[in-house]
């Protein structure tokens, strides 16, 4: 009976995994199909005549490299700034009691509940006001720095809340023991607590990276110049009024997804450890 239950669970798991994985497989397989095979009346689940022409079209497009550079800059800046600010805020709310602490935590929760589309216009108006106040010295609209600020508005609430759980997961008694042994409070935190939070920092930075790397909606509203496009927005130029170039579109989507997949392979151990170490603690 137990064996039958295990087999049933395994079958259900495989079925769910297949449903989740099939769109990704179809995207990758389509990227290797020629136009004739792509529009064949009989769907080809395996490319019968694989070709790399679609990838050649993508790599031969100069706008792709510009969009890749913009995405890389925006993602790296977002992750670095989000981790620096969120980590300091998480330690403050997890280790110290101060006036307004509960209000701050509630505001984070509220920010996480607000749909992103509802914040697009306020963010755009705020960036415009700042740019006007600086008399154009700060180029924030239709610019990568403004995009980073917008990404941070969405990444920080999640990062602060997640990192707070990781910090709470490390007993403060460990720091107190280190201080009894002669460490200052900063040294105790750096030598005892910080190494234990590293998996949490890795997990949070990955989710922040995915948010920034794949963000489309904010970029669509905040960026208008093609030379400022990020990769998700760059994909939209394959959809025109004359039709959609599915081959290069699928090849581009595969290339965009590849860095995230490779990064996951390298950090999956830390990610799993981090997710079970305190990310769900409130």
Image (tube, grey):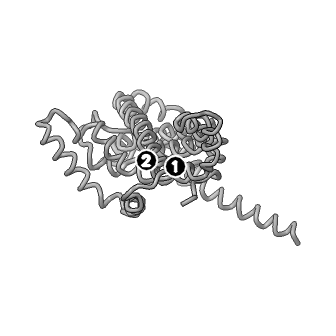
- Rendering coords of residue 121 (x, y %): 24, 55
Quadrant of image for the N terminus: bottom right
Tell me the SS state at disc 1. helix
Q: Residues within 10 Å of mark 2 (few under 14, many from 20)?
A: some
Res. 97 visible in picture: yes
> At 61% across and 44% down in the image, what residue appears?
176
Q: Which of marks 2 and 1 is in front?
A: 2
72 or 158: which is nearer to us?
158
- Rendering coords of residue 60 (x, y %): 41, 27
> At 13% across and 41% down in the image, what residue appears?
133
- Rendering coords of residue 97 (x, y %): 45, 55
- The residue that disc 2 covers is 89
90 or 238: which is nearer to us?
90
Q: How many marks?
A: 2
Rendered view: 106 above or below 29 = below
- 200 with respect to 12 (left or right): left
Tell me the SS state at disc 2. helix
121 or 138: which is nearer to us?
138
Res. 170 visible in picture: no
- Rendering coords of residue 260 (x, y %): 53, 40
Q: Residue 163 carries which label?
A: 1
> At 67% across and 42% down in the image, what residue appears?
269
Furthest-bottom residue in this view: 1
Q: Quadrant of residue 180?
A: top right
First in residue order: circle 2 vs circle 1: 2
Looking at the image, do the residues carrying marks 2 and 1 touch, with CB atoms under 8 Å apart?
yes
> At 52% across and 36% down in the image, what residue appears?
186
Quadrant of image for the C terminus: bottom right
């Amino acid at each position: 009976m137990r064996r039958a239950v295990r087999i049933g669970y395994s079958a259900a798991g495989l079925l769910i995994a297949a449903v989740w994985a099939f769109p990704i497989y179809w995207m990758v397989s389509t990227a290797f199909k020629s136009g004739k095979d792509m529009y064949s009346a009989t769907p080809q689940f395996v490319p019968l005549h694989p070709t790399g022409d679609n990838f050649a079209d993508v790599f031969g497009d100069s706008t792709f490299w510009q969009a890749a550079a913009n995405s890389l800059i925006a993602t790296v800046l977002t992750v670095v700034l989000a981790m620096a600010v969120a980590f300091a805020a998480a330690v403050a709310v997890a280790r110290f009691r101060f006036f307004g602490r509960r209000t701050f935590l509630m505001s984070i929760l509220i920010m996480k509940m607000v749909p992103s589309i509802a914040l697009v216009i306020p963010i755009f108006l705020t960036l415009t006001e700042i740019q006007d106040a600086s008399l154009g010295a700060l180029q924030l609209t239709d610019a990568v720095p403004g995009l980073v600020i917008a990404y941070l508005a969405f990444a920080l609430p999640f990062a602060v809340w997640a990192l707070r759980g990781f910090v709470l997961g490390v007993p403060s008694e460990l720091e107190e023991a280190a201080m009894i042994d002669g460490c200052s409070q900063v040294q105790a935190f750096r030598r005892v607590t910080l190494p234990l939070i590293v998996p949490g920092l890795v997990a949070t930075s990955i989710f922040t990276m995915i948010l920034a790397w794949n963000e489309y909606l904010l970029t669509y509203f905040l960026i208008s110049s093609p030379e400022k496009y990020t990769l998700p927005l760059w994909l939209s130029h394959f959809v025109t009024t004359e039709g959609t170039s599915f081959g290069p579109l699928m090849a581009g989507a595969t290339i965009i997804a590849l860095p995230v997949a490779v990064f996951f392979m390298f950090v999956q151990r830390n990610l799993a450890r981090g997710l079970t170490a305190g990310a769900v603690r409130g």
